[in-house]
Image: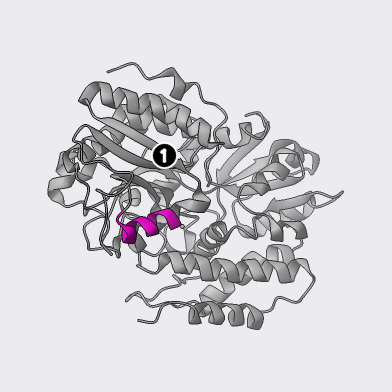
């Protein structure tokens, strides 16, 4: 086993951000068998940190194979549009990271290499990967459009000092307990739990899970939008009511975008937050490991499981190959390298995520209690977001509906079952017609 590069293991201030024909031979790609281009998603606290993490790994790959990898780290705000442009313009990379919730949408473009039995065998086989991670790689029944690279799940993080000051002895396990704890915490300008009302993806993640708890999936079995079912409406209203009715979310959270809730949590302004990644995320906000605790995200029964006891979507990053790459052999070698046990351990440790490769999960680096909660959630109580071609539109239109409802709540306007249903009806009308 080669020595893990210090540039990876030394990173301690990362935070995960936490949705036609292809063109692997276009601008930014290379026909040279000794060159690959790679679009990586922004997983760290900055693009520069990602480069410091990834470049030593790419240099090692070149040393082992003779294949040079040209790296570009792309912000999440640009990544999906860059990918969609690449699928139609003929100008794209050989290999790229994608948010796993986009797998089915990008699969439908025909741009990505299907991971058939032969391609999977070239990287060590399908059985190396955790089942829940494979569940977010494309439409069920079709060959995967990508392979898992980093895995994440939501958990409930709580501020230990705030809990102590409020006389809360243990973290909540049900929503009723979250509300009770939140009301004790919501005083003197502080709030019980943080949300990011302007973060469309986060909105979707939360209402999807609540939808599962209410028996709703937001899509029918044949893939048609079903945003106005009683369960879907109840799920969205329950989430908005944390601000509108229970008053345990600060009104200003209606305008919060990605990562803004973390600052309040780290500054003792918010007692709880539902988040995907632990120690690196909070340390980047100046919060020490003894200042926060973790518990599984709440479910109605208090015991996470399947169906109504689902407590997280399957979060993570997948690795895909453009189907028309002129260096398929090199691309397969690169994917095999990035999903090897050693790289999985090094990179997921650096980013505070969990390896989707079963054997890599056994490393002592992932025995920390905070990561154990994530690993157990992925194994037992997480569900994949709908694997339908319209998933990215779903994130946009329903995520926007939730954003608008939070704005209503923050402004003191009534949020009723009828007003929630009306917003979801409008969102459903914006979906592509089948």
Q: Is residue 82 above or below residue 352?
A: below
Q: Residue furthest right?
A: 188
| Residue drawn at (44%, 57%) of the image | 81
Task: Give the magenta part as a residue range.
Answer: 81-90
**Location of residue 347 by image quarter:** top left
Residue 385 coordinates in the image, percent (x, y): 42, 61
Where, quadrant-wise, is the C terminus in this rendering? bottom left
Q: Is residue 84 magenta?
A: yes
Residue 5 coordinates in the image, percent (x, y): 39, 19
**Location of residue 32 by image quarter:** top left
Residue 155 coordinates in the image, percent (x, y): 54, 47
User: What secondary structure do most residues of the magenta stretch adopt?
Assistant: helix
User: Would you name the residue on which mark 1 appears?
Assistant: 72
The reply to whether residue 419 is in sight is: yes
Name the foreground residue: 292 vs 327.
327
| Residue drawn at (35%, 51%) of the image | 132
Q: Is residue 269 above or below residue 67?
A: below
Q: Is residue 351 above or below residue 238?
A: above
| Residue drawn at (49%, 78%) of the image | 430
Q: Is residue 42 above or below residue 343?
A: below
């Amino acid at each position: 086993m080669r020595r893990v590069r210090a540039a990876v293991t030394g990173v301690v201030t990362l935070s995960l951000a936490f949705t036609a024909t292809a063109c692997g031979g276009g601008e930014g790609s290379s026909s040279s068998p000794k060159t690959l281009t790679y679009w990586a998603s922004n997983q760290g606290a900055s693009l520069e940190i990602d480069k410091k993490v990834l470049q030593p790994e790419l240099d090692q790959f070149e040393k082992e194979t003779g294949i040079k990898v040209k790296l570009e780290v792309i912000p999440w705000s640009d990544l999906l549009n860059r990918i969609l442009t690449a699928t139609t313009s003929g100008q794209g990379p050989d290999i790229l990271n994608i948010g796993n919730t986009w797998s089915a949408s990008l699969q439908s473009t025909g741009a990505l290499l299907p991971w058939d039995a032969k391609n999977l065998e070239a990287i060590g086989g399908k059985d190396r990967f955790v089942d829940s991670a494979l569940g977010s790689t494309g439409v069920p029944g079709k060959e995967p459009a990508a392979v898992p690279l980093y895995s994440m799940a939501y958990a409930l993080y709580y501020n230990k000092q705030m809990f102590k000051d409020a006389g809360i002895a243990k973290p909540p396990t049900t929503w009723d307990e979250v509300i009770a704890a939140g009301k004790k915490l919501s005083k003197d300008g502080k709030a019980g739990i943080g949300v990011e009302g302007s973060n469309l993806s986060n909105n979707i993640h939360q209402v999807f899970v609540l939808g599962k708890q209410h028996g709703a999936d937001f899509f029918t079995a044949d893939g048609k939008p079903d945003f106005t079912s009683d369960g879907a409406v109840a799920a969205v209203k329950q989430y908005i009511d944390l601000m509108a009715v229970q008053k345990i979310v600060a009104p200003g959270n209606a305008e919060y975008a990605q990562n803004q809730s973390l600052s309040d949590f780290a500054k003792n302004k918010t007692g709880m937050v539902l988040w995907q990644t632990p120690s690196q995320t909070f340390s980047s906000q100046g919060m020490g490991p003894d200042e926060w605790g973790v518990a599984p995200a709440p479910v109605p029964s208090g015991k996470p499981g399947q169906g109504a006891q689902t407590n997280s979507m399957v979060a993570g990053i997948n690795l895909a190959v453009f189907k028309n790459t002129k260096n398929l052999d090199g691309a397969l070698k690169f994917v095999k390298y990035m999903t090897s046990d050693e790289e999985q351990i090094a990179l997921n440790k650096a980013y505070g995520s969990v390896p989707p490769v079963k054997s890599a999960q056994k490393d002592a680096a992932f025995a920390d209690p905070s990561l154990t909660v994530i690993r157990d959630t992925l194994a037992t109580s997480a569900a994949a977001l709908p694997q339908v071609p319209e998933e990215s539109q779903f994130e946009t239109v329903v995520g926007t509906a939730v954003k608008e409802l939070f704005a209503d709540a923050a402004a003191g306007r009534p949020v009723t079952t009828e007003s929630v249903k009306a917003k979801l009806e409008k969102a459903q009308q914006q979906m592509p017609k089948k």
